[in-house]
Image (cartoon, grey):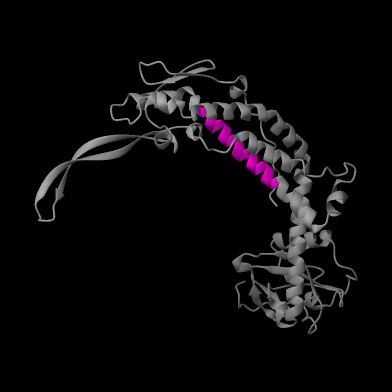
Amino acid sequence: MRIGDRVQISPQALQVKAIFPDRPGDDVVEEILEFIRAGNPPHEWRGHTHTKPPQGAPIMYIGGFDLDRDRAAPCPCCSSGTAKYFKGGKIAYFPDEHVVRMIGPDCFATLNPEGHEEAMEKYLAEKQRKREIDYILANICIAPELERVLEETLPLAEAVDTVRNTVSDGRLDEILGVELLPHMGAGVLSVTTERQETYVDSYGETGTRTAQHKEEYARIAGPVMVRKNASRFVNQLKHVLEAVRKIPAPDPNRIRESIEAMDETSRTQVARLLGNSVGTSRSIWKGLDDARGFFSPGNIATINGWGRHPDSPVQIEIRREGRDVTISRPGYNGRLIRLPEAFDKVLDELPKMETKP
Protein backbone atom coordinates (compact mmCIF):
# COMPACT_ATOMS: atom_id res chain seq x y z
CA MET A 1 0.00 0.00 0.00
CA ARG A 2 1.64 3.21 -1.24
CA ILE A 3 0.70 6.82 -0.49
CA GLY A 4 -2.26 7.74 -2.70
CA ASP A 5 -3.57 4.20 -3.05
CA ARG A 6 -7.23 3.59 -2.25
CA VAL A 7 -7.88 1.67 1.00
CA GLN A 8 -10.91 -0.49 1.74
CA ILE A 9 -12.01 0.42 5.27
CA SER A 10 -13.74 -2.37 7.13
CA PRO A 11 -17.15 -1.81 8.79
CA GLN A 12 -15.54 -2.73 12.11
CA ALA A 13 -13.03 0.13 11.77
CA LEU A 14 -15.82 2.61 11.01
CA GLN A 15 -17.70 1.82 14.21
CA VAL A 16 -17.36 4.40 16.98
CA LYS A 17 -15.70 2.65 19.93
CA ALA A 18 -16.31 4.93 22.89
CA ILE A 19 -14.63 2.52 25.28
CA PHE A 20 -11.96 4.79 26.75
CA PRO A 21 -13.52 7.13 29.35
CA ASP A 22 -10.02 7.71 30.72
CA ARG A 23 -6.74 8.20 28.93
CA PRO A 24 -5.43 4.77 27.85
CA GLY A 25 -2.39 3.58 29.78
CA ASP A 26 0.96 2.31 28.59
CA ASP A 27 -0.45 -1.22 28.32
CA VAL A 28 -2.92 -0.11 25.62
CA VAL A 29 -0.24 1.86 23.76
CA GLU A 30 2.06 -1.18 23.80
CA GLU A 31 -0.79 -3.39 22.53
CA ILE A 32 -1.29 -1.02 19.60
CA LEU A 33 2.42 -0.88 18.79
CA GLU A 34 2.71 -4.67 18.97
CA PHE A 35 -0.28 -4.97 16.62
CA ILE A 36 1.43 -2.64 14.13
CA ARG A 37 4.84 -4.30 14.50
CA ALA A 38 3.17 -7.61 13.62
CA GLY A 39 2.41 -6.16 10.16
CA ASN A 40 -1.23 -5.19 10.68
CA PRO A 41 -2.74 -1.94 9.33
CA PRO A 42 -3.03 0.63 12.15
CA HIS A 43 -6.68 1.38 11.31
CA GLU A 44 -7.63 -2.29 11.86
CA TRP A 45 -6.67 -2.32 15.54
CA ARG A 46 -9.64 -3.42 17.63
CA GLY A 47 -10.06 -0.09 19.43
CA HIS A 48 -9.48 2.28 16.51
CA THR A 49 -12.34 4.56 15.46
CA HIS A 50 -12.03 5.47 11.78
CA THR A 51 -14.35 8.45 11.76
CA LYS A 52 -13.45 12.10 11.31
CA PRO A 53 -12.97 13.92 14.63
CA PRO A 54 -15.27 16.88 15.34
CA GLN A 55 -13.95 20.29 14.33
CA GLY A 56 -11.95 21.78 17.22
CA ALA A 57 -12.06 18.59 19.30
CA PRO A 58 -9.49 18.34 22.11
CA ILE A 59 -6.78 15.76 21.52
CA MET A 60 -3.98 13.98 23.39
CA TYR A 61 -1.11 12.23 21.63
CA ILE A 62 -0.18 9.13 23.62
CA GLY A 63 2.17 7.29 21.26
CA GLY A 64 3.80 7.24 17.85
CA PHE A 65 4.89 4.78 15.19
CA ASP A 66 6.50 4.48 11.76
CA LEU A 67 5.50 2.18 8.92
CA ASP A 68 7.42 0.79 5.96
CA ARG A 69 6.96 2.86 2.82
CA ASP A 70 4.84 0.12 1.24
CA ARG A 71 2.52 0.01 4.27
CA ALA A 72 1.14 3.56 4.05
CA ALA A 73 -2.06 4.00 6.03
CA PRO A 74 -5.20 6.14 5.76
CA CYS A 75 -5.96 8.93 8.23
CA PRO A 76 -9.52 9.48 9.48
CA CYS A 77 -8.85 13.20 9.85
CA CYS A 78 -8.19 13.98 6.21
CA SER A 79 -8.01 10.89 3.98
CA SER A 80 -10.37 8.24 5.28
CA GLY A 81 -10.13 5.97 2.25
CA THR A 82 -6.70 6.87 0.87
CA ALA A 83 -3.23 5.91 2.09
CA LYS A 84 -1.77 9.14 3.49
CA TYR A 85 1.27 8.52 5.68
CA PHE A 86 3.90 5.99 6.70
CA LYS A 87 6.25 8.05 8.90
CA GLY A 88 5.37 9.79 12.15
CA GLY A 89 2.01 8.14 12.75
CA LYS A 90 0.27 9.18 15.97
CA ILE A 91 -1.86 7.29 18.50
CA ALA A 92 -4.42 9.95 19.40
CA TYR A 93 -6.87 9.97 22.29
CA PHE A 94 -10.01 12.10 22.08
CA PRO A 95 -11.26 12.61 25.65
CA ASP A 96 -14.61 14.14 24.73
CA GLU A 97 -15.53 11.16 22.53
CA HIS A 98 -13.74 8.50 24.62
CA VAL A 99 -12.12 7.11 21.46
CA VAL A 100 -8.67 6.35 20.05
CA ARG A 101 -7.64 7.04 16.46
CA MET A 102 -4.48 6.26 14.47
CA ILE A 103 -3.76 9.41 12.49
CA GLY A 104 -1.08 10.99 10.34
CA PRO A 105 1.75 13.09 11.81
CA ASP A 106 0.19 16.55 11.36
CA CYS A 107 -3.23 15.73 9.98
CA PHE A 108 -5.24 16.90 12.99
CA ALA A 109 -3.82 20.40 12.53
CA THR A 110 -6.30 20.86 9.68
CA LEU A 111 -9.15 20.54 12.20
CA ASN A 112 -7.64 22.21 15.27
CA PRO A 113 -4.23 23.87 14.71
CA GLU A 114 -3.90 25.19 18.26
CA GLY A 115 -5.01 21.89 19.76
CA HIS A 116 -2.50 19.98 17.62
CA GLU A 117 0.37 22.27 18.59
CA GLU A 118 -0.48 22.10 22.29
CA ALA A 119 -0.87 18.31 22.15
CA MET A 120 2.49 17.95 20.39
CA GLU A 121 4.25 20.05 23.03
CA LYS A 122 2.78 17.91 25.81
CA TYR A 123 3.54 14.69 23.93
CA LEU A 124 7.19 15.59 23.39
CA ALA A 125 7.53 16.70 27.02
CA GLU A 126 6.03 13.39 28.18
CA LYS A 127 8.39 11.43 25.94
CA GLN A 128 11.37 13.31 27.35
CA ARG A 129 10.13 12.77 30.91
CA LYS A 130 9.73 9.03 30.28
CA ARG A 131 13.18 8.79 28.69
CA GLU A 132 14.77 10.55 31.65
CA ILE A 133 12.92 8.42 34.20
CA ASP A 134 13.87 5.19 32.40
CA TYR A 135 17.45 6.39 32.04
CA ILE A 136 17.77 7.31 35.72
CA LEU A 137 16.12 4.05 36.81
CA ALA A 138 18.57 2.05 34.71
CA ASN A 139 21.68 3.91 35.88
CA ILE A 140 21.28 5.60 39.24
CA CYS A 141 22.55 2.43 40.94
CA ILE A 142 26.03 3.04 39.46
CA ALA A 143 26.57 6.33 41.32
CA PRO A 144 28.01 4.79 44.53
CA GLU A 145 30.29 2.47 42.53
CA LEU A 146 31.43 5.33 40.32
CA GLU A 147 32.23 7.43 43.38
CA ARG A 148 34.29 4.58 44.86
CA VAL A 149 36.27 4.01 41.65
CA LEU A 150 37.00 7.72 41.24
CA GLU A 151 38.21 8.05 44.83
CA GLU A 152 40.49 5.03 44.50
CA THR A 153 41.99 6.44 41.28
CA LEU A 154 43.06 9.72 42.89
CA PRO A 155 46.52 8.39 43.95
CA LEU A 156 47.19 7.17 40.41
CA ALA A 157 46.16 10.55 38.98
CA GLU A 158 48.38 12.33 41.51
CA ALA A 159 51.29 10.10 40.48
CA VAL A 160 50.81 10.87 36.78
CA ASP A 161 50.54 14.61 37.52
CA THR A 162 53.72 14.49 39.60
CA VAL A 163 55.70 12.78 36.82
CA ARG A 164 54.31 15.12 34.18
CA ASN A 165 55.28 18.14 36.27
CA THR A 166 58.82 16.77 36.54
CA VAL A 167 59.18 16.02 32.83
CA SER A 168 57.77 19.37 31.73
CA ASP A 169 59.37 21.71 34.30
CA GLY A 170 62.07 22.90 31.88
CA ARG A 171 65.12 21.17 33.40
CA LEU A 172 65.08 18.46 30.75
CA ASP A 173 65.07 21.16 28.08
CA GLU A 174 68.29 22.49 29.60
CA ILE A 175 69.86 19.02 29.72
CA LEU A 176 68.92 18.23 26.14
CA GLY A 177 69.68 21.71 24.84
CA VAL A 178 66.32 22.01 23.13
CA GLU A 179 62.70 22.59 24.13
CA LEU A 180 60.72 19.34 24.01
CA LEU A 181 57.23 20.78 23.67
CA PRO A 182 57.42 21.93 20.02
CA HIS A 183 58.87 18.59 18.94
CA MET A 184 56.84 16.14 21.04
CA GLY A 185 53.81 17.99 22.38
CA ALA A 186 51.50 17.04 19.51
CA GLY A 187 52.42 13.37 19.69
CA VAL A 188 54.17 13.42 16.29
CA LEU A 189 57.93 12.97 15.97
CA SER A 190 59.47 14.51 12.88
CA VAL A 191 62.84 14.62 11.17
CA THR A 192 64.13 17.33 8.87
CA THR A 193 65.82 16.23 5.65
CA GLU A 194 67.51 18.20 2.90
CA ARG A 195 66.62 17.76 -0.75
CA GLN A 196 67.71 19.32 -3.99
CA GLU A 197 64.81 20.97 -5.77
CA THR A 198 64.44 22.71 -9.09
CA TYR A 199 63.07 26.23 -9.24
CA VAL A 200 62.42 28.94 -11.83
CA ASP A 201 63.42 32.50 -10.94
CA SER A 202 61.68 35.74 -11.93
CA TYR A 203 63.68 35.87 -15.19
CA GLY A 204 62.58 32.41 -16.24
CA GLU A 205 65.96 30.90 -15.48
CA THR A 206 66.00 27.36 -13.99
CA GLY A 207 68.20 26.48 -11.05
CA THR A 208 68.57 24.06 -8.17
CA ARG A 209 68.70 24.71 -4.46
CA THR A 210 68.79 22.84 -1.19
CA ALA A 211 65.49 22.83 0.68
CA GLN A 212 64.59 21.42 4.06
CA HIS A 213 61.57 19.13 4.38
CA LYS A 214 59.89 18.06 7.57
CA GLU A 215 58.80 14.42 7.56
CA GLU A 216 56.87 12.40 10.10
CA TYR A 217 59.05 9.82 11.80
CA ALA A 218 56.52 8.25 14.18
CA ARG A 219 53.65 8.93 16.55
CA ILE A 220 53.99 8.46 20.27
CA ALA A 221 51.75 7.93 23.29
CA GLY A 222 51.60 10.36 26.18
CA PRO A 223 52.61 13.69 24.60
CA VAL A 224 50.81 15.34 27.54
CA MET A 225 53.91 14.50 29.57
CA VAL A 226 55.81 17.41 27.99
CA ARG A 227 52.92 19.90 28.19
CA LYS A 228 53.63 22.14 31.14
CA ASN A 229 50.20 23.77 31.26
CA ALA A 230 48.09 20.66 30.74
CA SER A 231 45.09 20.24 33.04
CA ARG A 232 45.88 18.18 36.13
CA PHE A 233 44.23 14.77 36.16
CA VAL A 234 43.61 15.06 39.90
CA ASN A 235 41.61 18.24 39.39
CA GLN A 236 39.59 16.60 36.63
CA LEU A 237 38.79 13.64 38.87
CA LYS A 238 37.80 15.85 41.79
CA HIS A 239 35.48 17.82 39.54
CA VAL A 240 33.70 14.62 38.47
CA LEU A 241 33.57 13.41 42.08
CA GLU A 242 31.89 16.65 43.07
CA ALA A 243 29.25 16.09 40.39
CA VAL A 244 28.68 12.44 41.35
CA ARG A 245 28.13 13.42 44.99
CA LYS A 246 25.32 15.72 43.88
CA ILE A 247 23.33 12.74 42.58
CA PRO A 248 20.66 12.06 45.21
CA ALA A 249 20.27 8.55 46.55
CA PRO A 250 16.63 7.47 46.05
CA ASP A 251 14.67 5.56 48.66
CA PRO A 252 15.72 1.93 47.96
CA ASN A 253 12.19 0.76 48.70
CA ARG A 254 10.57 3.35 46.42
CA ILE A 255 13.11 3.99 43.65
CA ARG A 256 10.62 4.55 40.82
CA GLU A 257 8.30 6.61 42.99
CA SER A 258 11.23 8.74 44.17
CA ILE A 259 12.37 9.46 40.62
CA GLU A 260 8.87 10.11 39.27
CA ALA A 261 8.28 12.54 42.14
CA MET A 262 11.23 14.72 41.07
CA ASP A 263 10.36 18.02 39.44
CA GLU A 264 11.46 18.51 35.83
CA THR A 265 14.54 20.57 36.71
CA SER A 266 15.82 18.07 39.28
CA ARG A 267 15.13 15.07 37.06
CA THR A 268 16.93 16.60 34.07
CA GLN A 269 19.86 17.58 36.29
CA VAL A 270 20.22 14.04 37.66
CA ALA A 271 20.11 12.55 34.17
CA ARG A 272 22.80 14.96 32.98
CA LEU A 273 24.97 14.40 36.04
CA LEU A 274 24.87 10.64 35.45
CA GLY A 275 25.66 10.84 31.75
CA ASN A 276 28.29 13.57 32.00
CA SER A 277 30.04 11.96 34.97
CA VAL A 278 30.52 8.61 33.26
CA GLY A 279 31.40 10.21 29.91
CA THR A 280 33.98 12.53 31.48
CA SER A 281 35.40 9.66 33.54
CA ARG A 282 35.95 7.62 30.39
CA SER A 283 37.83 10.55 28.88
CA ILE A 284 40.00 10.85 32.00
CA TRP A 285 40.68 7.11 31.96
CA LYS A 286 41.80 7.36 28.34
CA GLY A 287 44.02 10.32 29.19
CA LEU A 288 45.64 8.52 32.13
CA ASP A 289 46.36 5.44 30.06
CA ASP A 290 47.79 7.52 27.23
CA ALA A 291 49.96 9.59 29.59
CA ARG A 292 51.44 6.48 31.24
CA GLY A 293 52.09 5.06 27.78
CA PHE A 294 54.88 7.62 27.42
CA PHE A 295 57.07 5.34 29.52
CA SER A 296 55.99 2.04 27.97
CA PRO A 297 58.75 -0.09 26.41
CA GLY A 298 57.49 0.36 22.86
CA ASN A 299 57.13 4.12 23.22
CA ILE A 300 60.59 4.44 24.75
CA ALA A 301 62.06 2.44 21.86
CA THR A 302 60.34 4.74 19.36
CA ILE A 303 61.61 7.90 21.08
CA ASN A 304 65.15 6.49 21.34
CA GLY A 305 65.17 5.54 17.65
CA TRP A 306 64.08 9.08 16.79
CA GLY A 307 66.67 10.54 19.16
CA ARG A 308 69.44 8.61 17.37
CA HIS A 309 68.24 9.59 13.91
CA PRO A 310 70.82 11.91 12.28
CA ASP A 311 68.06 14.29 11.13
CA SER A 312 66.19 14.44 14.44
CA PRO A 313 65.94 17.90 16.04
CA VAL A 314 66.29 16.35 19.50
CA GLN A 315 69.05 14.02 20.60
CA ILE A 316 67.34 12.10 23.42
CA GLU A 317 67.62 8.77 25.16
CA ILE A 318 65.26 7.30 27.74
CA ARG A 319 66.17 4.36 29.93
CA ARG A 320 63.78 2.67 32.33
CA GLU A 321 64.58 0.10 34.96
CA GLY A 322 61.56 -0.70 37.11
CA ARG A 323 60.32 2.60 38.42
CA ASP A 324 63.58 4.46 37.73
CA VAL A 325 63.63 6.47 34.48
CA THR A 326 66.64 8.36 33.16
CA ILE A 327 66.27 10.90 30.36
CA SER A 328 69.42 12.28 28.75
CA ARG A 329 71.28 13.02 25.57
CA PRO A 330 72.84 9.81 24.18
CA GLY A 331 76.08 9.08 26.01
CA TYR A 332 75.56 11.74 28.69
CA ASN A 333 74.35 11.72 32.25
CA GLY A 334 70.77 12.78 32.47
CA ARG A 335 67.91 13.33 34.84
CA LEU A 336 66.67 10.51 37.05
CA ILE A 337 62.93 10.37 37.59
CA ARG A 338 61.45 7.96 40.12
CA LEU A 339 57.96 6.89 39.09
CA PRO A 340 55.64 6.79 42.14
CA GLU A 341 54.35 3.36 43.09
CA ALA A 342 50.79 4.27 42.09
CA PHE A 343 51.93 5.23 38.58
CA ASP A 344 51.60 1.67 37.24
CA LYS A 345 48.42 0.80 39.16
CA VAL A 346 45.83 -0.98 37.05
CA LEU A 347 42.86 1.28 36.41
CA ASP A 348 39.59 -0.06 37.79
CA GLU A 349 36.84 -0.65 35.25
CA LEU A 350 34.25 2.10 35.15
CA PRO A 351 30.59 1.20 35.70
CA LYS A 352 28.69 0.79 32.44
CA MET A 353 25.66 2.88 31.51
CA GLU A 354 22.64 0.82 30.46
CA THR A 355 20.81 3.31 28.26
CA LYS A 356 21.06 6.79 26.82
CA PRO A 357 18.67 9.61 27.81
Residue 178: in magenta span? no
User: Image check: 138 left or right of 297?
Assistant: right
Residues in magenta, as a range = 275-293
Quarter of the view holding residue 287: top right
* Residue 240 at x, y percent in the picture: 69, 40
Q: Residue at (59%, 20%) from the top-left corner?
A: 340
Q: Residue at (72%, 43%) from the top-left corner?
A: 243
Residue 291: in magenta span? yes
* Residue 45 at x, y percent in the picture: 77, 68
Q: Is residue 335 visible?
A: yes
Front-most of residues 162 and 24: 162
Q: Residue furthest bottom?
A: 55
* Residue 245 at x, y percent in the picture: 77, 40
Quadrant into which the N terminus falls = bottom right
**204 w.r.t. 207: above or below:** below
Front-most of residues 268 and 235: 235
Quarter of the view holding residue 129: bottom right
Q: Residue at (58%, 30%) from the top-left corner?
A: 161
Q: How many marks?
A: 0
Front-most of residues 165 and 345: 165
Q: Residue at (73%, 70%) from the top-left corner?
A: 120
* Residue 319 at x, y percent in the picture: 44, 18
**345 w.r.t. 128: above or below:** above
Front-most of residues 308 and 253: 308
What's the magenta bit mostly, secondary-structure-wise?
helix
User: Image check: 185 left or right of 314?
Assistant: right
Q: Is residue 352 visible?
A: no
